[in-house]
Image (spheres, grey):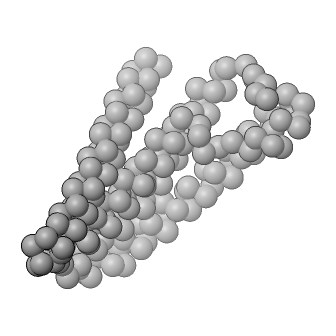
Amino acid sequence: MRVLGRIDRGLSRLVSWVAQAMLWSAVAAGFYQVLARFVLQSPSAWSEAWTRAAIIWAVMLGVSLAFRQGAMLGVDLLHNLLAPRRARLLEHLVLLIVVGFLGFLVWIGIDMTWRVRFQSTPSLGISISWIYLSIPIGAALSLLGALAYWAEDSRVPYVETV
């Protein structure tokens, strides 16, 4: 279990760094776009496309970090109304639905990425599939995060939050 814990922490740290780098690059490209358009009077063609792509990647990777922390799995209102045993069953039901949805998103994301592999972004000159690839990768990392949170949380006794 220690090895899996280290892998989990290392993967979370790597995903966090990449998501942060993508977000910072989106901010820098957006700032450059404003500077080029309004100060230099020569708008750049690539910065808007890069900003959009970097934000998509940052969001998909960030969602996986939220799933790993359990931030996306709460149904607080119903959870607080139920008895502890039924609340625990609700948690398992929600996880089952989330795992099904994320598995479906991985499958659809792979299909979408494959279908657009020959299209390219005019301003960046890269295949648009690199942008679409964020969907299956983010969903797969979210799936792993949700399962890791569930496995870790299943050992912790139920604690009521009000």
Residue 101: percent from left, percent from top: 61, 58
Q: In the rendered view, would you say 101 is above or below 8?
A: below
Residue found at the far front of this picture: 39
Relative side of 26 to 93, left or right: left
Residue 134: percent from left, percent from top: 37, 60
| Nearer to us in this view, 43 or 4 | 43
Residue 59: percent from left, percent from top: 42, 55
| Nearer to us in this view, 70 or 4 | 70
Q: In the rendered view, would you say 22 is above or below 52?
A: above
Relative side of 155 to 63, left or right: right
Question: Which of the image's four quarters has the C terminus?
Answer: top right
Q: Residue placed at 69% from the left, 42% from the top?
A: 74
Residue 79 visible here: yes
Q: In the rendered view, would you say 19 is above or below 39?
A: above
Q: Residue placed at 75% from the left, 22% from the top?
A: 159
Q: Residue placed at 55% from the left, 55% from the top?
A: 102
| Nearer to us in this view, 7 or 52 | 52
Residue 2: percent from left, percent from top: 43, 17
| Nearer to us in this view, 10 or 35 | 35
Q: Residue placed at 41% from the left, 66% from the top?
A: 110
Residue 22 visible here: no
